[in-house]
Image: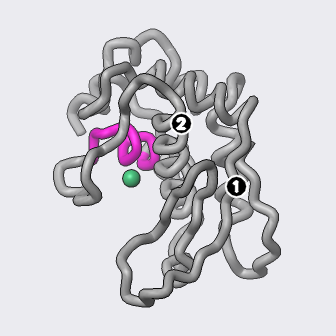
């Protein structure tokens, strides 16, 4: 489970965490869609396994593991980092929280992909921190899919994903 225990009124973190936990568990339309057989053939960029398997691994981790979400005030107030993940802890830059819930959900799902990646022999990260050309790597792609589902209910077909 992804846990968030701080009490910060006005922050959208608790809502984003709630949906990250829901979407990645069997029985939810998001999980059921992206683990359907059509996605066996879809491999995110820089990954050595397919989208379906990555979602399955994320789900297993969320059901049986623990991830802590915290707010973080970077010493360097100009840093562009929106989040920093250490071990099993996702630290969200408090200075970059003034954005829609779907965007925060995207960040939490993105960082969850990194945590799960680091606990498996498969590789599905995005290499360096330069985001250019990385939109179809697992962290950026699954984060975006969660954000779009939250904002509009959209579920992408294989062909739509391929065309992104
Ligand atoms: Zn990342």
Quadrant holding the C terminus: top left
- Percent of width and height locating residue 70: 67, 66
Q: Name which residue lies at 53% across and 36% down.
A: 116
Q: Which residues are magenta?
A: 135-144
Is residue 45 positioned above or below 32 on the image?
below
| 151, 102: nearer the viewer | 102
SS assignment at label 1: strand
Q: Which residue is mark 1?
A: 68
Q: What kind of secondary structure does the magenta stretch mostly adopt? A: helix
Q: Name which residue lies at 40% across and 44% down.
A: 139
Q: Name which residue lies at 74% across and 31% down.
A: 63
**Is 140 situated left or right of 90 in this image?**
left
Quadrant holding the N terminus: top right
Find out if the beta carbon at label 2 lies less than 8 Å from the nearest ligand 1 atom: no
SS assignment at label 2: helix
- Percent of width and height locating residue 45: 25, 33
Is residue 58 positioned above or below 49 on the image?
below
Say few, some or many: other residues with alpha carbon within 10 Å of mark 1 (under 14 / 14 to 19 / 20 or more): some
Separation of residues labelled 2 and 1 (CA atoms): 13 Å
- Percent of width and height locating residue 21: 70, 43
Say few, some or many: other residues with alpha carbon within 10 Å of mark 2 (under 14 / 14 to 19 / 20 or more): many
**Is 115 situated left or right of 163 in this image?**
right
Is residue 129 positioned above or below 57 on the image?
below
| 34, 119: nearer the viewer | 119
């Amino acid at each position: 489970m992804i846990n968030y225990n701080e009490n910060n009124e006005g922050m959208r973190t608790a809502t984003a965490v709630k949906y990250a936990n829901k979407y990645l568990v069997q029985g939810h339309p998001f999980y059921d869609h992206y683990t359907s057989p059509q996605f066996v053939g879809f491999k995110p960029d820089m990954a050595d396994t397919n989208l379906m398997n990555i979602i399955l691994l994320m789900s297993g981790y969320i059901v049986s593991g623990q991830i802590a979400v915290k707010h973080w005030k970077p010493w360097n107030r100009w840093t562009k980092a929106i989040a920093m993940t250490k071990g099993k802890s996702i630290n969200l830059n408090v200075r970059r929280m003034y954005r829609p819930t779907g965007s925060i959900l995207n960040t939490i799902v993105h960082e969850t992909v990194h945590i799960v990646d680091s606990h498996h022999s498969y590789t599905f990260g995005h290499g360096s921190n330069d985001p250019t050309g990385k939109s179809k790597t697992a962290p950026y792609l699954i984060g975006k899919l969660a954000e779009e589902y939250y904002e509009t209910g959209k579920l992408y077909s294989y062909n739509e994903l391929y065309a992104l």
